[in-house]
Image: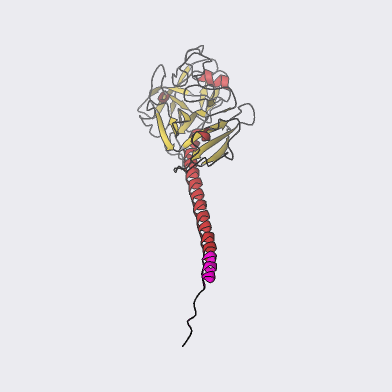
């Protein structure tokens, strides 16, 4: 009779042990791959949110102060319409008495929130006064795509307040500009970036003949608006984080609008008397909650800023930052 060969109990146990080691190693590898995928997914999502916030913020920064006085004192005087320049013409910029923290102090203004400014050089909110190109084309002036002054306009240096009609070409949108007195809305203010010295004007009258009557309240020292300078609309905004969202209030009566959610905080640094570099850090989080406290710190988040990421440490956080040199 032929003998039947089989596995002994010892051989079976050894095979099971080897199989267990192999399967355990495979499971550990799979778990590691899954965790790495989870991490990469969270970081990518958080970075995308931060980049959206930075992209939304940039237009309010790059044209901040364009056509406006470079010093804080002159900036504040420029938006006052009485001859002694003591009466605020713009409640959205100066809602309180002089020196109050509710007022803009400069065209790049750090703030603690959407209500109060701060004098320190780093803060969690940013207020800006900026200029928006009107975008019309100069008639007969070649291919320049700009709204322009047709001839040099001399500013009367002997008058603290003057009114002058200047010729422009191209159409101005009624939704963007309006004549009013007192000039208590942003739509009544315009700027010319190449004007010397730079300061804003109020719109006294819009004519049908291709001209605009402007009034200055800060013409001390005289100056000129050069030919073909582009007319800009003066605008302002408050940028801040609230309720886990990055928000922008354009101060046009529409209120604060949410831009992107999943934003835990913002930190801004700016020294107007130093290098004039504005740095904004956005602390963004992923969209999926994980088990346990998964971060002990966030790289790039300043030690002086509140550790807001600890409020909800079940999410992964990442810092997205950007710097601009304010040249205006």
Q: Where is residue 108 drawn, in percent x and y?
A: 54, 28
Is 291 contained in the magenta span?
A: no
Q: Where is residue 274 drawn, in percent x and y?
A: 64, 28
The residue positioned farthest toward the right in the image shown = 274
Is 11 contained in the magenta span?
A: yes
Q: Is 33 in front, or is 42?
A: 33
Asked whether residue 268 is in view, the answer is yes
Q: How is the image coloured?
A: secondary structure
Q: Where is residue 167 drawn, in percent x and y?
A: 43, 29
In this picture, is 32 found above or below 62?
below
Q: Look at the image and give the residue range highlighted in magenta.
A: 2-18
Residue 300: which quarter of the image?
top right
* Quadrant of the snapshot with the C terminus: top right
Q: Where is residue 222 drawn, in percent x and y?
A: 56, 20
Residue 257: which quarter of the image?
top left
Q: Is 165 in front, or is 112?
A: 112
In this picture, is 86 found above or below 45?
above
Query: How many numbered marks have been drawn onto this rendered protein structure?
Result: 0
In this picture, is 284 found above or below 105?
below
Asked whether residue 218 is in view, the answer is no
The residue positioned farthest toward the front in the image shown = 1
Q: Is 56 in front, or is 213?
A: 56
Q: Is 286 in front, or is 158?
A: 286
Residue at (47, 45) in percent of width and height: 45
Residue at (49, 54) in percent of width and height: 34
């Amino acid at each position: 009779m032929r003998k039947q060969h089989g596995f002994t109990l010892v051989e079976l146990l050894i095979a099971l042990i080897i199989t267990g080691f192999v399967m355990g190693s495979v499971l550990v590898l799979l778990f590691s791959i899954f965790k790495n995928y989870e991490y990469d997914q969270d970081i990518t999502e958080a970075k995308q949110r931060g980049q959206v916030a930075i992209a939304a913020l940039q237009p309010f920064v790059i044209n901040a102060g364009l056509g406006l006085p470079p010093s804080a004192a002159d900036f504040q005087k420029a938006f006052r319409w009485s001859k002694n320049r003591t009466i605020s013409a713009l409640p959205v910029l100066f809602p309180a008495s002089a020196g109050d923290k509710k007022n803009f102090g400069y065209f790049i203004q750090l703030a603690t929130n959407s209500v109060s400014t701060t004098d320190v050089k780093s803060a969690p909110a940013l207020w800006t006064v900026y200029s928006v190109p009107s975008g019309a084309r100069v008639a007969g002036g070649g291919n320049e795509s700009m709204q322009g002054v047709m001839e040099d306009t001399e500013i009367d240096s002997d008058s603290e307040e003057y009114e002058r009609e200047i010729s422009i070409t191209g159409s101005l949108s009624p939704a963007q500009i309006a004549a009013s007195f007192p000039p208590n809305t942003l739509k009544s203010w315009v700027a010319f970036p190449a004007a010397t010295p730079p300061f804003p004007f109020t719109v006294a009258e819009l004519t049908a003949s291709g001209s605009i009557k402007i009034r200055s309240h800060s013409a001390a020292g005289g100056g000129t608006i050069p030919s073909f300078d582009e007319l800009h609309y003066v605008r302002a905004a408050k940028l801040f984080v609230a309720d886990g969202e990055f928000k922008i209030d354009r101060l046009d009566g529409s209120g604060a609008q949410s831009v992107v959610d999943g934003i835990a905080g913002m930190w801004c640094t700016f020294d107007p008397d130093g290098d004039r570099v504005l740095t904004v850090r956005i602390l963004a989080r992923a969209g999926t909650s994980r088990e346990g406290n998964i971060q002990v710190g966030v790289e790039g988040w300043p030690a002086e800023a509140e550790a807001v990421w600890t409020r909800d440490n079940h999410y992964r956080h990442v810092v997205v930052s950007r710097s601009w040199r304010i040249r205006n």
